[in-house]
Image: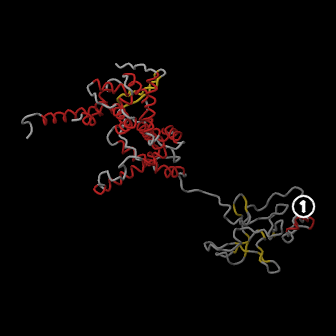
Amino acid sequence: MDATQLLKGVLDAAVLAVVEHEDGYGYDVVRRLRAAGLEDVGDASVYGTLRRLYAAGALTSYVVPSGEGPARKYYGTTPQGRALLEEQRKSWRSFAETMTTLLEPGEAHR
Amino acid sequence: MSAPTPETPAELAAAREYAAAVRSALADLPPDVVEELAGGLEADLACSAAESATPLRDRLGEPARYAEELRAAAGLAAPAAGAPGGTGGPAGPAPARANPLAVLRADLAQGWAESAAAVRAQRWWPWASDLARTLRPAWWLARAWVVWQLLFGGSDTTSGVLPGSLGGLVALVALSLASVELGRGRWAGRTGTGAGVTAANAVAALALLPVLAAAAAPVSSVQYVTETGTMPSTGVWVDGQVVSNLFPYDAQGNPLTGVQLLDDYGRPVQVGEDNRTDWSGAEPDPYRPAVDAEGQVRWNAYPLQVGAGPDGGGRAVEVPRPEPTLPALVGAPATPSATPSPDLVAPPAAAPTAPPAPEAAPGS
């Protein structure tokens, strides 16, 4: 199965998780996700997700000027974002358990 | 952990070029949404470019595809114009099976989004939205005041605008604080606040003008107005009151009766309001006119007399005077006389003649 299809549903949780403890700018977030194992994640998908989570109030955003280069836009979590992440953690665990059981070879499901 | 790598000018240029192409693919969106989506993109792309020698286009694909992915991930609809099978196209899910209410809602949402985009595209929009943002605290206070007026305004005002009691003041301050905290987003995220705030804002906006009008009106609805303009100002007035009788005295201060008075135009001076016609029927006019030798009724002979009978009928008698006599005037002739001597008659300028024709008016 195409991992990018699976990723779509959980990208919000993944993005929230990598900025939970340390603020990051767009490409930084992409890099963290890839380093965590999500190699196929698309830059634009991550940036779009960051903008959407920001618009929804789950992320804060601030611009940091960088020398002579273009300014970087950093993102960090809000209390609302942390609550959302906690919620998604729970639903992911229950979903993952269900799927693991379901996909177990043998007699796990009738 | 990830210290930003310094980019070379070439990488920066490549990032700028790619970002510009992405922005132009988003050009159908309002400028501030484009900025929201693509803000900081140059820096991120430059970072990405610095990591690998592969050109950005090869790594990230066509900018248009990239823009589409960005847009979709941000939860925005695909561009309406030029999108094959887009709005209303046959490729979409069969519209006939859709819930008509949902279709209507989607249509409304799209219409709203399109009008909002058209407004945002105006040149004055950044100025106006910035102004509105600046004025938001004023609105927070105004809506608190409107809510307070709606809750307590009827019972607790002295001036109609501000609270008249300590309790009212406390309520107003509490509402203002709540409104400002709400406005600053302190309570965002609690379930139900969004819809509640929208509803309260709508109520406050609708009620603002009526409440203002009601509060600006005086607390007491009874007003005493001197309507001099609408009342007939006939008769003789002293200190704003209609005179009902006059009591002449001669130079020695002795009371006179039957004194006929004319004004400077020679018109009879007549007291009382309404030409001596009893139209009210409530209280018959007690006064009786004098009659001259030619049989003319004279209302300008003072003091006016009243009828002796219980209903004002019968023989005419004099009414009691406010003062029986007055001190004599300095330089007055010693002999009292009821009829003025010819040398005391008023000067010719004020001679009692017929009312003057315009060309005879003095000084014209």
Q: Chain of mark 1?
A: B
Left of A104 or right of it: where is B306?
right
Above or below: residue A55 compared with residue B287: above
Check the image and name the residue furthest to the left. A107
Give the quarter of the image for residue B352.
bottom right
Q: Residue at x 39, y 24 (%)?
A: B49
Q: Secondary structure at mark 1?
A: loop
Check the image and name the residue furthest to the right. B343
Q: Please provide percent x and percent y for residue B40.
A: 43, 29
Give the quarter of the image for residue B230.
bottom right
Q: Residue at x 35, y 41 (%)?
A: B193
Task: Work out whether residue B177 or residue A108 is closer to the camera in this orientation and state it.
Answer: A108
Residue position marked by numbered label 1 in the rendering: B334
Please rate how many residues cluster around mark 1, counting C-alpha atoms within 10 Å: few if below 14, some from 14 to 19, many from 20.
Answer: few
Tell me the kind of residue under disc 1: Ala
Q: Please provide percent x and percent y for residue B280.
A: 62, 72
